[in-house]
Amino acid sequence: VPPWALVAIAVVAGLLILCCCFCICKKCCCKKKKKNKKEKGMKNAINMKDVKDMDNDKEDLETGLTEGDEKEEEKEEEKLGKLQFSIDYDFQNNQLTVGVIQAAELPALDMGGTSDPYVKLFLMPDKKKKYETKVHRKTLNPVFNESFVFKVPYSELGGKTLVMAVYDFDRFSKHDIIGEVKVPMNTIDLGHVIEEWRDLVSAEKEE
């Protein structure tokens, strides 16, 4: 074999090896670029998902706050008025005297923007003896100044609750209850006369 032929074969072989190395390097670079591009795309997608979740959480929080504010406003708007009363106990005669003094800021339940209030009072749980005040026509701030006596031994008084319910009188239908005040007798000091105002709270309609 002539020497020039050997040189030619060596040159051709070197070129083939260089071409193969170049192709391998090019493929590796392309795969790396594709991988980086894919990872970048996934990262962007995850970031967008996080942003979307944060927006949804924010909307839910704002919705929750709005609903809570609306409920609180409704609760504040539900004002039933207040009742002034007195309680006095005669230990010698075992008599509980309840004075219904007046009511104020009652809601208007009649068509003319007024009410015809009266107060029904009794001792729970027996409800055997019930009293009622006189009906005051077309007023939201009635002054009753009426007293009622319950004959109750002091030993039994601690287990009873005084209920004073304010009603709106209606001549042609069932009377509407406006609200009530409940006073558990074991929560007050009967050693002296009690006189105070209390807010009316909603109550179930009584037959």
Image (spheres, grey):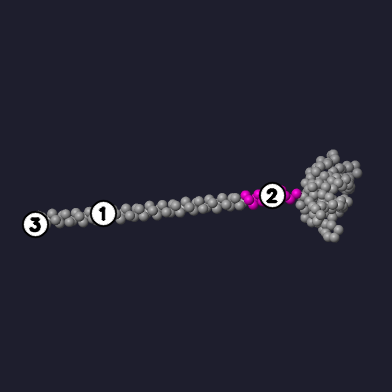
> Residue 175 in the image: x percent, y percent?
83, 57
Q: Amino acid at mark 2?
A: Glu
Distance of mark 1 from mark 3, alpha carbons?
A: 31 Å
Q: Residue furthest bottom?
A: 172
Q: Amino acid at mark 3?
A: Pro
Q: Amino acid at mark 1?
A: Phe
Q: Answer with left or right where residue 158 lies relative to residue 65.
A: right
Secondary-structure class at tag 1: helix
- Residue located 60% across and 50% down the image: 62
Image quadrant in which the N terminus is located: bottom left
Q: Nearer the viewer, mark 2 or mark 3?
A: 2
> Residue 186 in the image: x percent, y percent?
80, 44
Q: Answer with left or right where residue 10 lies relative to residue 72.
A: left
- Range of the magenta residues? 65-79
Q: Main secondary structure of the magenta part?
A: helix
Asked whether 160 or 205 is in front, the reply is 205
Q: Which mark is residue 73?
A: 2
Q: Residues within 10 Å of mark 3 (few under 14, many from 20)?
A: few
Image quadrant in which the C terminus is located: bottom right
Residue receiving disc 3: 2
Asked whether 48 or 130 is in front, the reply is 48
Q: Which mark is residue 89?
A: none
Please check the rendered image and state whether residue 140 is part of the magenta-colored stretch, yes or no: no
